[in-house]
Amino acid sequence: MKINSKHLEKVTVNIDNGPVRVTDVLYTGPVKNSNENDWLNSDIENIFADTNIEISENHLIRFKNDNECECLFYEGHNLDIYEFPLKNIYVENGDVAFVFFNISSSKDQKAVIYLGGFCRNKLWVNNTLISNRILLEADFYYNIVNLKEGDNIVIAECGCIPGLNGICNLTVLVNSVDDEFAGREGEIIKGYIYGRYRNSINRVSVIQENWDYSNKSSYEFSILPIDFSIACNETDIQISIKDYYGRCIDKFHARFNQRLSVDLTELREKYPESVSLTFCIEYETIEGERVETENSIIINDIHKIVDNIVIKYKQIKNTCRISEEDTVNIEERIKELTGIVDTYGFSTYFEPNGNTQIRNARVDIINNIPQIFIRESKVLTALLEQVQKGFHYKDLL
């Protein structure tokens, strides 16, 4: 897609001028989202009826579902370094709005794009999806991308955060990588960015509905690199699936921005004792660096693990002599484990009298909670086994 030459200059930021915040844009919406443009869609052809059009002010844009909406020019005011909304739009569930602007570059170079605001956001640069996430803060979410010499058209999709109707806003700050990483301050930023996601879950962005798939028949997801300057849609990704006990049960290859699906019903039948799956994601960057990261989901009733730990603890308490100090420490550890469940998707309480109460209060599990729960449950199980053998809790830490 292109922006009409009459309006291009008004919505262009020049990355050669140092860090610059996007304030003047063309926008359209909100409109009813097309069925093809679900949360895994990365193709703008599933959004717009014609992707060869020139975006221009006061013209109608037609969407894949035949809805039409006028495109308007928005000029930003009252710049706030912490959070400046390009546009406040009341968006209901199922509606989306789109923002269009241009990044001008005097040469082919790498750029850092910081995103902020409050919305469900996708961001395309030169028709390639580089970001797909929920924005909750200002200038917190970064992406590194290759810009070509000349114009680089950016399309930003804004929708309401799932389950919430209300105001959506977006803030965008762009800078060249060379300028961003220059000097002592740049080295700090560089260390923060690369240190933050090197060989961790933040090295890639796994696009999925939530973390709890215990009631789902399939797991649909896609993968995006945080640094698109050292990867591309053609990069080969190797994915290994491990069960709760760390056994590799399947392997396959994938690409960035590819819609992927795993049959959970079949895996539950083969591995009924596994409450989780861990996806080990590996790829080689353009620079030859090997990246390894993991992402976990819950596929069965997570209470089984909690119940087994509580039962094992009761058995040990009834058959072995446990010091008062160990009793306090172990029960506190169990409370912490069930607290993870309670806070991020499942309500389970361990009480000193030995009763386990469970209620189904499901909410989306966020961040890397499955990894935390899996790790903590395995550590606690191993600790109980050692306590059963006569070791003291404090000596095992």
Image (spheres, rainbow, N blue to C red):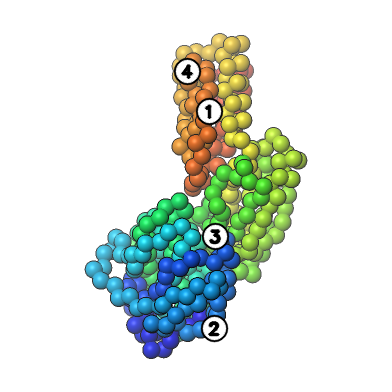
Label 4 sits on residue: 352
Q: CA distance from mark 4 to mark 1?
A: 15 Å
Front residue of this view, candidates 27 and 102 = 27
Q: Amino acid at mark 1?
A: Ile
Label 1 sits on residue: 358
- Horizontal relation, residue 71 to residue 63: left or right: left
In this rendering, the label closer to the viewer, 4 or 2: 2
Residue 347: x and y in percent read 50, 32
Residue density around tag 1, few if under 14, some if 14–19, many if 20 or more, within 10 Å = some
- Horizontal relation, residue 102 to residue 80: left or right: right
**Secondary structure beneath disc 4?**
loop
Label 3 sits on residue: 39
Residue 325: x and y in percent read 46, 16
Q: CA distance from mark 1 to mark 3?
A: 32 Å
Seen in the picture, residue 221 relative to 79 is either above or below; the reply is above
Q: CA distance from mark 3 to mark 2?
A: 23 Å
Residue density around tag 2, few if under 14, some if 14–19, many if 20 or more, within 10 Å = few
Are the two marked residues, 1 and 3, in contact with CB atoms closer than 8 angstroms? no
**N-terminal label among 4 and 2:** 2
Label 2 sits on residue: 52
Who's the residue at 47% across and 84% down the image? 54
**Secondary structure beneath disc 3?**
loop
**Secondary structure beneath disc 2?**
loop
Q: Is residue 149 visible?
A: no
In this rendering, the label closer to the viewer, 4 or 3: 3
**N-terminal label among 1 and 2:** 2
- Name the residue furthest bottom: 6
Who's the residue at 52% across and 19% down the image? 355
Q: Amino acid at mark 4?
A: Pro
**N-terminal label among 1 and 3:** 3
Residue density around tag 3, few if under 14, some if 14–19, many if 20 or more, within 10 Å = some
